[in-house]
Image: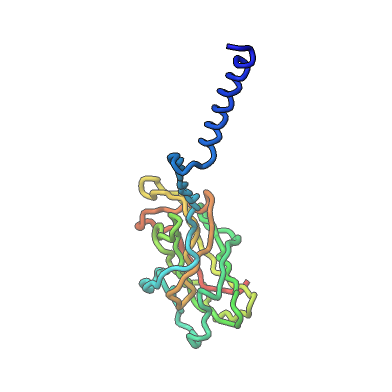
Amino acid sequence: MSRTSRLLLPLTVAAALALTVSACSSGDPEAPPTATETVTATATPTPTPSSPPTSFPTATPGPDGASGGGGDLGDGAAGAADDRCRASELSGSIDDGGGGAAGTVGVAIVLTNTGDRTCELQGWPGVSFVGDGNGTQVGAAATLDRSSAHDTVSFAPGGEAQAVVQMTQAANYDPAECEPRAVDGFRVYPPGSVEALFVPAGGDLFTACANPDVQQLSVGAVQTF
């Protein structure tokens, strides 16, 4: 074989290889398709902590002397039902309610008129502890302190009234009797209403006795400051 033939042979082989590679990568219809895997990712929602509801289902007024749903309008002139403040027109907060007997704390439940009309409250609200993040009542509802005056309170939008709750501290009871539990706050029925609002209150001070036979709370009538 001549020197020229020996030089041309490798070049011929290289050219043939280049043509073969080009054909494989040019989308030859005879070439098998390439499979593509599709992966679907499912997002897991981040749970949000529950919070107590701001309103509660219709309730049945409690017996005389207890502040179940509806509270008590007292024996005075209650005025027209349409003039009463509805739960949806009120917001609630907690304030210092003054001193109490040994082992008892006074807590003022302050009701603010958030509506767009002047409305009235008269008598005793229904008050109870609630917990579990869903408005479940904890322990017995407050009894009614009938020694307190219960004149009609009329207040314009933005005005405030209060009802003082005397609360015996859970630490005063035997734990086995009390069954102490942390709470989220209070469920409050305005006098004469079967709709309630939630008033937040937490911390060690607001520890409830879950045993319904323990009477821990007593509430006075709604009054002006």
- For the C terminus, the image quarter is bottom right
Instruction: Give how far across and how far down residue 106 sits, in percent.
Output: 55, 60
Who is closer to the viewer here, 209 or 81? 81
Q: How many marks?
A: 0
The residue shown at (56%, 73%) is: 90
Identify whether 142 is placed above or below 119.
above
| Residue 77 in view here | no
Q: Is residue 99 above or below residue 118?
A: above
Q: Residue at x 45, y 76 (%)?
A: 193
Residue 97 at x, y = what percent? 58, 62
Q: Is residue 63 above or below residue 21?
A: below
Return the x and y of residue 12 as percentages of the image width and height: 58, 24
Residue shown at the point (60%, 74%) measured from the top left: 114
| Residue at x 55% of width, y 32% of height | 19
Residue 183 visible in image: yes
- On the rendered image, what quadrant is the N terminus found in? top right
**Residue 141, position as x, y percentages in the image:** 41, 63
Q: Nearer the viewer, residue 201 or 79?
A: 201
Which residue extends farthest front? 2
Viewer-proximal residue among 53 and 109:
53
Q: Is residue 52 above or below residue 179?
A: below
